[in-house]
Each structure stands twice: as structure tokens, then as C-alpha cells.
Amino acid sequence: MTEQRPLLEVTDLVKHYPVRGGVLRRQVGTVHAVDGVSFALGTGETLGLVGESGCGKSTVARTVLRLVEPTSGAIRLDGEDIAPLSKTALRPYRRSMQIVFQDPFASLNPRMTAGDIVGEPLSVHGIATGAKKQERVAELFQQVGLRADQMRNFPHQFSGGQRQRICIARALSLGPRLIVCDEPVSALDVSIQAQVINLLIDLQRKQNFSYLFIAHDLAVVAHISHRVAVMYLGRIVEIADKHELFANPRHPYTQALLASVPIADPKAKRSAPLIDGDVPSPINPPSGCAFHTRCRYAIDRCKSERPALQAAGSRHQVACWLNDGTGRDE
Amino acid sequence: MSEALPAETVLDVKNLQTVFFTNSGLFRAVDDVSFTVRRGETLAIVGESGCGKSVSALSIMRLVPDPPGRIVGGSVTLEGTDLLKLDDAAMRDIRGNRISMIFQEPMTSLNPVIRIGDQIIEAVRLHQKVSSKEAWKQAVDMLRLVRIPEPERRAREYPHQLSGGMRQRAMIAMALACRPALLIADEPTTALDVTIQAQILALIVDLQQRLGTGLILITHDLGVVAQTAQRVIVMYAGKKVEEATVESLFETPLHPYTRGLMASIPAVPSPDAREDVRLIEIPGMVPSLTKLPPGCAFAPRCKLAVDRCRQEYPPLDEVKSNHWAACWRAGEMAEAS
Ligand SMILES: Nc1ncnc2c1ncn2[C@@H]1O[C@H](COP(=O)(O)OP(=O)(O)OP(=O)(O)O)[C@@H](O)[C@H]1O
Ligand SMILES: Nc1ncnc2c1ncn2[C@@H]1O[C@H](COP(=O)(O)OP(=O)(O)OP(=O)(O)O)[C@@H](O)[C@H]1O
Ligand code: SF4
Ligand code: SF4
Ligand SMILES: [Mg+2]
Ligand SMILES: [Mg+2]
């Protein structure tokens, strides 16, 4: 395959949080929030990250941006490992990586005008001031479908969808190459979600950004992503092109996840069985394959040995002992 | 029309009107809404944030905070009794007995300092005179019914010791402990993961059908509607704008808002799906209830709007058999489909 160097390459990323307890606040355990995650993201590509609450999606997103310090692992941006860089050395890279959060209400300063919010990174990074800044902000407003005269308004004067546009405009202001979207539409009304999803797709087509896109709504992730990675308890258990993943899910957890999505068609009957039980705690994750406590196919080996991500057909990787590498059923 | 209800009708809501008096003025959160629920039937209520779904539910329960809210019109007939005419004491007897409600966040209705089993016992004993031993046994049975593993042990635990999914199950156990005629579930699975959501929905529907309970399911997830409900009402800005069987609604939605909603949700890709279909956007935003436009409230966002829409509110007509829509152009849409 003639692959260019990916924009972002994450290798064996680990993030552990200490759990403290007792009066002395001694460490009594470890949260395995992210436990050895590797993936690559090409220029102009969208990688979707899905999985149940607490599986480590946001932690991956934040460590990639170094908003959270990784415990170990490499984060290569254009081939340069940014994981060990000091705050100062990191600065030039910050411009290329931006994040859009779930809650457009909480992430905007209510006392700043929309124009100042979007223009702030330009001043902070000393890129533009005065009239030049205003001009750039007006341009950003127009790009995300807001009017320039709305620059003077305060966040409360915007609807949820419009506020998310402000967040996106701010993320775009420094000309980033990677935008991490952590549940960017989850707080929005269904009828507004489509506006934001379409905007993100249009912007990518024009400016060739790469997106790391997190959402708990599988249909939304599938719609916007080129490839999708499924996480379970801090690990990627399956990663593939989206059509391949949805047509041919190989990991029992992915199969269960897809089967659990209610389909908006009364004639579509649920086919696959549901999985029982809850997600185990990431403090003492199960040994071997972390999914073995809920897996219908578990064999003895699954309880003691952890399966690594292995090829299962083309551009498709699965971490499961049932995978024989062919991408076909036995 | 005759006053006698068909035997299987559990709930009959007629012309319900609930208003709020706020600083920015009076508005109708629920405006002339009618619907029925039959035994063992699931009625879904969908619509966007603020359209009046929860206030409709709270009105049925007579739990609308007053002030600022008040039910100003209509009737809510449960098993032949108009709840709006009952005094507070009689209404308390109905709540948690003939009607139960499940909320989105289980911790709001579970008491953190009382053991799970004891909370269910309270629900059982409120309306049933049984010994404490018998009540405890019933509580454990309920936990088993909602498939909580090791129910004897869990009954002795406190809410914080249970996972989110288990708490939601415990709440369902509590809601059904009194065998209500009507169960109202307001976004019961929104806070849960999709695999747990699927378990809980399957559980609610299974129990509801076995016990013959009427179910009102409030949700914004059209997938959940398609998979669980028999009938659906769609609300927009306080009004019912469409009602149909679930099959008819998904096959031929007859209100432009419902159509927009269906076109704007991405589908899980299937092998035969066309590559990269663009989502259809509903432009604009939901109007503020205090500043509703004259005529059809959806007109500012509606591609089909004509002059008449901006002047007169469209009546809710039975456009097809058993399929109602409040839209001046629903007839044309029905013919075209
Ligand atoms: N600062 C922290 N200290 C301790 N534990 C943390 C911290 N941040 C996250 N965690 C834990 O790490 C795990 C992964 O959390 P993360 O927020 O990445 O999950 P997520 O997949 O984004 O979940 P969600 O879908 O709910 O947003 C969780 O168990 C969480 O409780
Ligand atoms: N206690 C209250 N005081 C004032 N207004 C209220 C109150 N409760 C609800 N409202 C208003 O009544 C309208 C209907 O609210 P309701 O809670 O029924 O919406 P909903 O359809 O359940 O929305 P969501 O999907 O967000 O839960 C909204 O405009 C809301 O702001
Ligand atoms: S490795 Fe074993 S337990 Fe894990 S998913 Fe595969 S079969 Fe199931
Ligand atoms: S009545 Fe008119 S504005 Fe309202 S939904 Fe129908 S066509 Fe659109
Ligand atoms: Mg998260
Ligand atoms: Mg509500």
C-alpha cells in the first residue's frame, strides 16, 4: 500500500490515574483509563472513536492534545513525538491541534462577545491584532455560517447549534490540521445536530483537516467517519474502515454494540442477541481479554491471555482470540 | 361522542392545557393536547427539547410546580376517573399506585440513605397491607424480575453501590412494585450506554406486556420509538402536530417537522447504502414559546410554508385512516406518497 506518513500516529498510549483512599489519601488502586492504545490518522481523514461511557475516549482525546499528561506512549504529529516535549517546546504544535467539546454552554465565557471568543487565540498566539484580527474573525464567522454582525453578541444570545458554531470557529482560528471533536453534537437537539455535522464535513472537504471524532451515537460517528475504532475498557478492540466495520464486525463486543443500536425503522427487527451485564470497573479490569466477563464466545484462554490487535482482512484489525487473520468466519 | 370509554383504554387525555407564568410572560407549555393509552400499549411522545413532553407527563401526574405552572384546561381520565377533579389526598393515592413514573436520572428518585429493598417495600406497602417479611420477599422478587443479579444481596445495598444500569432497573422495580395501570417513562435510557439501554428497553417492554401496563415512553430517539412503541405522537412548541401508528409514521410522515426529523438523523450504514448521503438540515431553531409566530409554529423553518400557514393555525386532521397531522399541506403530502 502506498501510504503517506500519517498526520497523527499514536503508539501504546497509556494513561493511569491513581485512586486514593483512607484518611492518608494513600494510593489504593489505579484507574486504567487508557491502556495501550495505538492508531494512525491521515491528513483529511476522520477517525471515529466509539465505546461505552468510561472506556477512555475523552482521555485518549485529551492526552493526544497533551491537555492530560500521558503515563507512557508516543504521540507523533507529522513524525515528531510530542509526548516528551516541555510546555514551551510544545507551543508551536498547539496551534495545529484544537478541540471542540460537548457542551457549547459550558465552554464559552458568558462575559465575552462571540467575536472576542473566536479572536482570543489569535491574540494569545500573537498572530493578529486590531483590524486584521477583526477581519479574520469575520471570515471565520462566515465559514461556520454565522453573520459578521453577530460578533458583538454574547453567548446567551445564541442557540445551542450557533454556540457550537462559535466553538468550531474558535477551533479553526489558528489554522489547525487536527481537530478533536469530543461529543460535539450530543448536547444539541436532533434537528440541530445535522446542521453541525454537515458543517464539520463541509469544512473538512474545503480545508483537509483531520478529525478525531468521539460520540456515543454510533450512527453519527458512522456518518462522519472514514474509519472507526471501537474501545472497551481503555483499549481499542477493533478498528476498520467504516463500511467494513458495520458490514463485517469481527469483535464480539462490536457485534453486540451494533446490535444494540435501535434502528429507526419499525420493520427492522433486532437480529443479534444483546449482551448482558454491565461494563466492569477500569480500576480492576478483568484479566486476559477484558470483555471475557460478558462474552458469549469466551474460551479458557480469554481469561488469562490478552489478545493483541491483529489483522483481520484488509485495513481491519481485531483484538480477539477467535480472529484467525482471514477476516472470514471459520 | 359517548362518555363511556372502550374497556381497554387506561388513560384518556383530552384538550390538556398547561401554562407557565414567568418573567418573560405567560406561555402554553402544553396547548390543547389529547391522546389515549390502552392496556399493554406503548405510546411514544417525541419532539425536541422544550416542546412540552415532560410537562405533559407531569400534568398527568399532577406534579406541575404551581407556581409558576398551572393546568388550566382539559381532562385526564385514568380508568374512568378524571384526575384533574380529585383532591390532593385522592391524587396521592393514585400516584405510585395506579400511575408510576420512571425518570431519566435514577438518583433523583432513589433515596441515597435507604437500602434498595426498603425503598421497594415502601412502594409495596403504601398500597398493600402485607407483613414486613412478605413485603421484603416481594421486593426481592421485583429485583429478580428486573434481572438484577443476586437480588437478595442487592436488596440490602444502598443506591450508590449499584451501577447506573442496575439503579435504573431498581427504579423500574420500584415503579412496577404496585402493578400500576399506567407507567410513564421520561427518557428512561438517555443517560445509559447503548448496550445497557437495549437491555433496559427490552425489559420495560417485556414487563409492561406481561403485566398489561399502559406505557407512555418519552424520548427524542426515533430508533427507540421504532423499536418499542405501537403509536406515536409528535409534539412541536407545545402542540401535538402528528399522531399515527408507528408503522404509518415511519412509512409516511405527514408533518414537515416529522419529515425533517427523520431526514436529519444519520442511519447506521448498511452495505447497500449510498456513499456519503448528506444529512438534510432543518434550518433555523425552535421558537421561544413566549414569542410564537401567528399561524403554524413551524412555518419559519418549513420549506413547504405558504401564506396561509403564517396566518392560521392548521387543525389536526385525520389525513389518512388513524393518522392525524396538523399541517395545511398534509393532504397533498399524503396524496403524493
Ligand atoms: N481525572 C481523573 N481522575 C481519575 N479518573 C479519571 C479521571 N478522568 C477520567 N477518569 C476515569 O478514566 C476512565 C475513562 O474516562 P473517560 O472520560 O476517558 O471516558 P469516556 O470514554 O470519555 O466516557 P464518556 O462516554 O462517559 O465521556 C473512567 O473510568 C473515568 O472515571
Ligand atoms: N418549572 C418551570 N418553570 C418555567 N417553565 C418551565 C418549567 N418547566 C418547564 N418549563 C417550560 O415548559 C416548556 C416545556 O418543557 P418540558 O420540560 O415539557 O420540555 P420537554 O419536551 O420535556 O424537553 P426535554 O426534551 O428537554 O426534556 C419549556 O419551554 C420549559 O422551559
Ligand atoms: S478474546 Fe475471547 S473473551 Fe475476548 S472477545 Fe474474543 S472470544 Fe470473547
Ligand atoms: S402548516 Fe404550513 S408551515 Fe406548518 S408545517 Fe404545514 S406546510 Fe409547514
Ligand atoms: Mg467522554
Ligand atoms: Mg423533558
Image (spheres, helix red, strand yellow):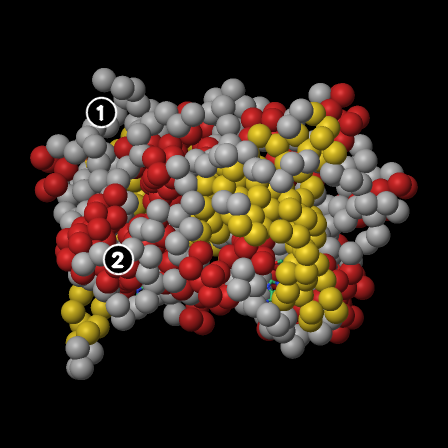
Q: Position of residue A32 (x, y in %)?
A: 25, 57
User: Disc 2 sits on a residue from what chain?
Assistant: B
Callout 2: 10 Å neighbours few (<14), some, many (20+)? Answer: few
**Amino acid type shown at disc 1:** Asp
Mark 1 to mark 2 CA distance (whole Å): 61 Å
Q: Residue at x 31, y 51 (%)?
A: B177
Q: Nearer the viewer, residue A183 or B149?
A: B149
Q: Residue at coordinates 33% horizontally, 24% vertically from top-left?
A: A313
Please state if B105 lies on the left or on the right of B260 as rendered: left
Q: Are marks 1 and 2 in contact (CB under 8 Å)?
A: no
Q: Chain of mark 1?
A: A
| Residue B192 seen in the current view | yes
Is residue B206 in sight in this rendering? no
- Tell me the quarter of the picture where residue B129 sits: bottom left
- Front-most of B147 and A120? B147
Q: Residue tagged by mark 2?
A: B129
| Residue B298 at x, y percent in the picture | 75, 46
Q: Picture quarter containing residue B246?
A: top right
Q: Is mark 1 within 8 Å of ligand 3?
A: no
Give left or right: position of B300 versus B33. right
In the drawing, does residue B235 fall left or right of residue A61?
right
Nearer mark to the viewer, of 1 and 2: 2
Which residue is nearer to you in this view: A52 or A200? A52
The dot on residue A324 is 1
Q: Are marks 1 and 2 on the same chain?
A: no
Q: Nearer the viewer, residue A261 or B82?
A: B82
Q: Does residue A53 lie above or below A134 as drawn?
A: above
